[in-house]
Image: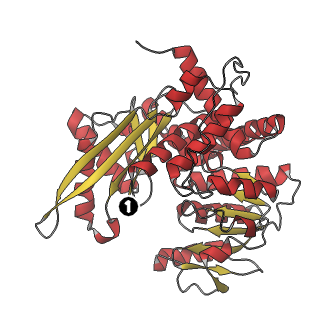
Amino acid sequence: MADLRLPTNTIVRPDKDRFLNEENPFEAMMSRFDRAAELLDLEPGIYKVLRSAEKEITVSIPVMMDNGEVEVFTGIRVLHNTSRGPAKGGIRFDMNVSLDEVKALAAWMTWKCAVVNIPFGGAKGGVICDPLKMSVGELERVTRRYTAGIIATLGPDSDVPAPDVNTNERVMAWLMDTYSMHVGHTVNAVTTGKPVEMGGSLGRREATGRGVMLTTLQALDHLKMEVKGATVAVQGFGNVGSIGAQLLAEQGCKVIAISDRTGGWHNPKGIDVLDAMAHVRKHKTLEGYGKGEAISNEALLELEVDVLVPAALENVITTKNAKNVKAKIICEGANGPTTANADTILDEKGIFVIPDILANAGGVTVSYFEWVQNRGGYYWDEQTVNDRLKNIMVSSFRDVLKLSQQHKVNMRTAAYMVAISRVATVHRLRGIYA
């Protein structure tokens, strides 16, 4: 863990009035960054560097649609910081993609990589489109043209994308192939989250959910709560939420509520997670599952449970509902599910929050493993991947917990302090190129 004894002869005085819009993701990230920077007495120069993205790229993506008409989409890629290594971050296809959102997520990736101490910086990207209304051919053409548009920044040593919202292994295969065709040879390390047949890592699909399970177990142990029978509610039953729920159930927890965009189901006697996953594989959503009482996504957040896992959208716990949250532990499987203004309310209620940059860092950790395997041309079995993931997640949780106790701050602030300190240390050592 980086030495946190920082210089105290200078002080940062962030503009505390700047954070005005609770649901703006960039402002939420910056308010948390400011709090940690102030506690660390971060030098003004380093503060200015770390709060700014290195590159913000916007590209026009003209695509011939299946009906013969040309549509022009907008693509974004932001590299926040590459001082510790290549930029790392997902690409999402969604109508709600915006520069503010992508900038926030890129910065979150910088802190996420640093908090688990892997040698990557942070990036994020997206295309403003509705993939649910597009054919496979249209999605492929969007992906390839977007890749060509940002190709100058891509590369195993510079910028390594991964799947995110509405993208998957197939999209990463198209991206890898496009990049490889441009450089004239196969470069499987240019992206992670690929099909295993193309150099993807075993255990990658389950990694984020596994990280949620591992950090939740650490929190239960810290709070001296029994794992067996601990009640869990999971909002979001996609890859992260469903696998997190499955793995927690395997450890002896009792999952009593699950939900997705169609709504949810609550059963105090426990939900058979594998059965629910089978329903989703067959019907695509939880709609019609029926094995419990119907419950809204909003009501699920307010259930009296030991562990709440928000694994769906950003900004679902806000000042409007935080006072109604009754969970003892919140494990943030999604990025930014809790607004910055809601943090204070949760603190006052004594809720132990495992912040997103730690809780869901299992995915980027195994992405790092995939990149290492690609670079070395040597592949690990799944048990090796899972064992190495456990070592990193457990040690990272303990680093953050130790700092939280030392400085008497919550886990989110401590996680940002650990991450910012590690990135700042590298900037001091590298200096400023002039």
Instruction: State the image quarter where residue 157 is shown.
Output: top left
**What residue do we see at 60% from left, 39% from top?**
33
Task: Indicate the quadrant containing the N terminus: top left, top right, bottom left or bottom right.
Answer: top right
The percent coordinates of residue 3 (x first, y second) are 71, 22
- Name of the residue lying farthest toward the right: 224
Q: Is residue 265 left or right of residue 328?
A: left
- Name of the residue lying farthest toward the front: 17
Q: What is the tally of numbered marks visible in this picture?
A: 1
Instruction: State the image quarter where residue 159 is shown.
Output: top left
SS for dot 1: loop
- Name of the residue lying farthest toward the top: 434
Is residue 23 shown above or below 6?
Answer: below
Task: Indicate the quadrant containing the C terminus: top left, top right, bottom left or bottom right.
Answer: top left
Report if residue 99 is visible in the image: yes
Is residue 34 shown above or below 175?
Answer: above
Q: Is residue 227 left or right of residue 332?
A: right
Tag 1 residue? 94
Residue type at mark 1 is: Asp
Q: Is residue 164 left or right of residue 15?
A: left
Instruction: State the image quarter where residue 389 is shown.
Output: top right
The percent coordinates of residue 107 (x first, y second) are 51, 40
**What residue do we see at 78% from left, 49% from top?**
218
**What residue do we see at 29% from left, 44% from top?**
58
Report if residue 418 is visible in the image: no
Is residue 115 shown above or below 315?
Answer: above
The percent coordinates of residue 269 (x first, y second) are 77, 80
The percent coordinates of residue 82 (x first, y second) are 46, 29
| Camera-nearest residue between 261 and 49 | 49
